[in-house]
Image: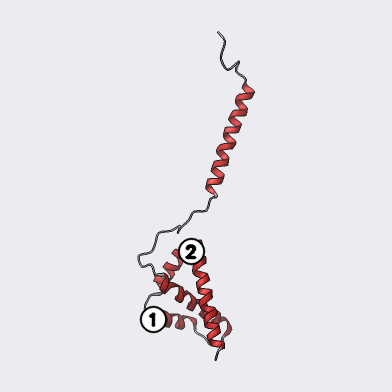
Amino acid sequence: MKLPCGPFNPMEANKMRMLLLLFALFLVVFTACEPKNGPRIAAPETLLDDSLYIPLLAEMQLLQVWSTTADSVNLEDLKKEVFKQYGISEYDFEQTHRYNQSDYQRQRARLDSVKLLIEAEKRRIQGY
């Protein structure tokens, strides 16, 4: 009786195993490296809306810059005042900020909005 596929060749079998292994490795590497969309951590209980978060983040950035240029600025007191003005806690802001940073694509858009707000504030101040 003659086999339809010919005699067994161990070298061909090893080549097929090697190709299958390389293909599986290829799939694992490219699926593992694919960036995931969306946040990578769970949302906090109190997630600030972008309409509140973006201006507050701009304020925090301005405070940070101001504190590095002024000697007599107490950054913590100013932060407390800003959070009081916005009616939120520093904890809620930090949790929202941590969550938003886990979604780097949307956070980049938020940071672009912050940059526009800061540039607008700069133009307003230079107008005086």
**Residue lying at 36% horizontally and 78% vertically, measured from the top left:** 87
Amino acid type, residue under disc 2 in the picture = Arg
Q: Give the answer, above or below, for where 101 lies relative to 52.
A: above
Amino acid type, residue under disc 1 in the picture = Lys
As drawn, the label of residue 47 is: none
Q: Position of residue 35 (x, y in %)?
A: 52, 53
**Residue lying at 53% horizontally and 78% vertically, measured from the top left:** 118
Front residue of 124 and 41 = 124
Q: Give the answer, above or below, for where 102 lies relative to 62.
A: above
Name the residue tied to disc 1.
84
Dot 2 alpha-carbon crowd within 10 angstroms: few under 14, some 14 to 19, many 20 or more: some
Q: Position of residue 111 (x, y in %)?
A: 51, 70
**Residue lying at 62% horizontally and 28% vertically, measured from the top left:** 15
As drawn, the label of residue 106 is: 2
Residue at the top extreme of this rendering: 1
Q: Position of residue 48 (x, y in %)?
A: 39, 70
Front residue of 91 and 14 = 14
Q: Quadrant of the N terminus?
A: top right
Q: CA distance from mark 1 to mark 2?
A: 27 Å
Q: Quadrant of the C terminus?
A: bottom right
Q: Please give left or right for residue 78 compared with residue 13 in the image.
A: left
**Residue lying at 55% horizontally and 84% vertically, measured from the top left:** 123
Q: Position of residue 37 (x, y in %)?
A: 48, 56
**Mark in front: 1 vs 2:** 2
On the image, which quarter does residue 43 sit in?
bottom left
Query: What secondary structure is found at the residue carrying circle 2?
Result: helix
Which is more N-terminal, label 2 or label 1?
1
Query: What secondary structure is found at the residue carrying circle 1?
Result: helix
Figure coloring? secondary structure
Assess whether mark 2 and mark 1 are in contact (beta carbons under 8 angstroms). no
Dot 1 alpha-carbon crowd within 10 angstroms: few under 14, some 14 to 19, many 20 or more: few
